[in-house]
Image (spheres, rainbow, N blue to C red):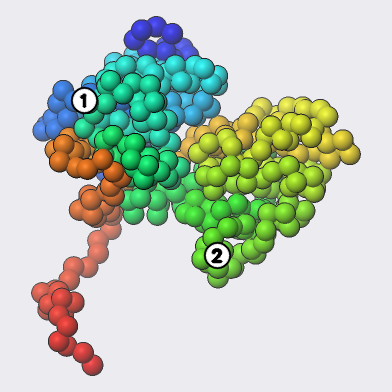
């Protein structure tokens, strides 16, 4: 690792630049924000540290933030999600310090996070809350300079709300994940499509006719179940929340406990944000040839250490596929080491949906720079005006128009006097 950056190979920069430009074509909302940022410089001189998946879409966010005048240092939020050519391009072509190498070990992963922390950020940008957690645990001396932060994921928001509840969160966070223009689209349509993409790239199996088990029916689980059914799979959902389970039933899916699903499933995808969702007693009853993948943030949803203890042998028949042989001869395969399958085995979400997510990031950071010093040390939603403005811009970029309320309609909606 050099002092200025740590990427795999700077000779990949030109290839990365072309792919970043390709993604930019599908990110018109962020492009409009970038144009304004270049003119107004709302982030001039602001130090940003970002812990994000280093992909082509993230690169366009990074370029937008630096166009606004920010000084940005970027590290990876997952050891397997970095696109090495993109990291190289940001360093060489955009002079943005990046600390990220696809396949980095755990020690290097945290060394890279610490490198981003050393930037002494005024705003943190996180995807899973590892950056915020490291700052709070190891470098409390730097927290006095922090205005606020943003968080991209469900898992990160859960961690940060726990910190706020325990009274240890020391600066305000905007929960980008909770914006309607983020989770209704990124989590559902982005995760749905990219999970199937990663699964198919890793295995090249036919989904039609398979029994496909989705663990968790949040927005990510909804998207995965929807896309798996669209590919011809028979989908079963497991849940711990009665309301979500009921919704899955009403959406036409079978709902059952994981132990029951484990006995019939061909493919399993977790999307819960919790630990050991697929555990030892599930492995013991799975069919020969079962395939397991995770679309939750951390690689804890599948109890891989437990599976390793049960296995008598492990092979890798395809890149990114670990096949565990049980004592009775059954084979259970895990994709991408149990990490995010859409990033470990594919390219993550399509740029078009990340356009809205990262527009929320850019405008959320601008909001923090303006108003963060007046906010309490807790987790905030994205302001409604930002959410609706992004939706308006996205529709306009798609060439679509919608109706507006007439004065008469506005008056009716605000009145209690008129009835039947």
Q: Quadrant of residue 307?
A: top right
Q: Residue furthest top?
A: 2
How far across and how far down the image is residue 15, in percent? Answer: 43, 20
Q: Residue at x 61, y 35 (%)?
A: 338
Q: Is residue 316 visible?
A: yes
Left or right of residue 141: residue 214: right
Q: Residues within 10 Å of mark 2 (few under 14, many from 20)?
A: few
Image quarter hosting the N terminus: top left
Give the tally of numbered discs.
2
Q: Residue furthest front?
A: 167
Residue tagged 2: 242
Q: Residue at x 16, y 36 (%)?
A: 373
Label 1: state its secondary structure.
helix
**Horizontal side, residue 19 vs residue 94: left or right:** right
Q: Position of residue 12 (x, y in %)?
A: 44, 15
Q: For marks 2 and 1, give the CA distance.
A: 43 Å
Report the residue that reaches farthest toward the bottom.
420
Query: Marks 1 and 2: in contact by CB < 8 Å?
Result: no
**Label 2: which secondary element:** helix
Who's the residue at 61% across and 53% down the image? 214
Q: Nearer the viewer, residue 20 or 346?
A: 346
Q: How many other residues sit within 10 Å of disc 1, few (<14), some (14-19) or many (≥20)?
A: few
Residue found at x 40% / y 43%: 162
141 versus 388 height, above or below: above
Q: Is 27 rendered above or below residue 96? A: below
Instruction: Report the residue marked by disc 1.
Output: 145
Q: Residue 168 location in percent, x, y? A: 34, 36
Closer to the camera, 86 or 6?
6
């Amino acid at each position: 690792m050099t002092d200025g950056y740590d990427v795999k190979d700077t000779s990949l920069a030109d290839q990365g630049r072309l792919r970043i430009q390709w993604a930019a074509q599908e990110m018109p909302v962020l492009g409009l924000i970038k144009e304004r940022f270049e003119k107004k410089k709302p982030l001039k001189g602001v130090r940003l540290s970002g812990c994000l998946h280093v992909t082509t879409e993230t690169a366009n966010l990074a370029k937008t933030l630096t166009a606004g005048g920010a000084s940005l240092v970027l590290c990876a939020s997952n050891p397997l999600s970095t696109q090495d050519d993109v990291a190289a391009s940001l360093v060489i072509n955009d002079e943005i310090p990046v600390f990220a190498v696809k396949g980095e070990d755990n020690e290097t992963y945290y060394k890279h996070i610490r490198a981003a922390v050393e930037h002494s950020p005024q705003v943190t940008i996180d995807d899973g809350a590892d950056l915020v957690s490291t700052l709070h645990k190891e470098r409390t001396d730097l927290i006095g300079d922090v205005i606020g932060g943003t968080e991209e994921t469900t898992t990160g928001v859960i961690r940060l709300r726990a910190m706020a509840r325990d009274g240890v969160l020391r600066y305000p966070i905007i929960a980008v994940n909770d914006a309607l223009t983020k989770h209704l689209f990124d989590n559902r349509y982005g995760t749905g499509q990219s999970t199937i993409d990663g699964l198919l790239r890793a295995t090249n199996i036919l989904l039609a006719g398979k029994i496909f088990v989705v663990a968790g029916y949040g927005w990510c689980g909804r998207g995965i179940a929807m896309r798996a059914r669209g590919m011809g799979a028979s989908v079963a959902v497991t849940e711990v929340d009665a309301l979500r389970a009921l919704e899955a039933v009403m959406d036409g899916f079978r709902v059952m406990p994981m132990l029951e699903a484990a006995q019939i499933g061909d493919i399993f995808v977790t999307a819960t944000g919790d630990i050991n969702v697929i555990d030892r007693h599930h492995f013991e009853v799975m069919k020969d040839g079962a395939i397991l993948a995770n679309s939750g943030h951390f690689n804890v949803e599948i109890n891989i250490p437990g599976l390793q203890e049960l296995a008598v042998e492990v092979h890798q028949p395809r890149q990114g596929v670990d096949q565990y042989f049980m004592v009775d001869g059954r084979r259970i395969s895990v994709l991408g080491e149990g990490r995010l399958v859409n990033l470990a085995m594919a390219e993550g979400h399509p740029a078009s949906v990340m356009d809205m997510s990262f527009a929320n990031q850019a405008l959320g950071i601008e909001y923090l720079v303006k108003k963060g010093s007046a906010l309490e040390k807790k987790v905030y939603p994205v302001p409604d005006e930002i959410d609706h403005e992004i939706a308006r811009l996205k529709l306009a970029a798609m060439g679509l128009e919608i109706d507006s309320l007439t004065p008469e309609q506005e008056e009716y909606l605000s009145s209690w006097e008129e009835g039947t």
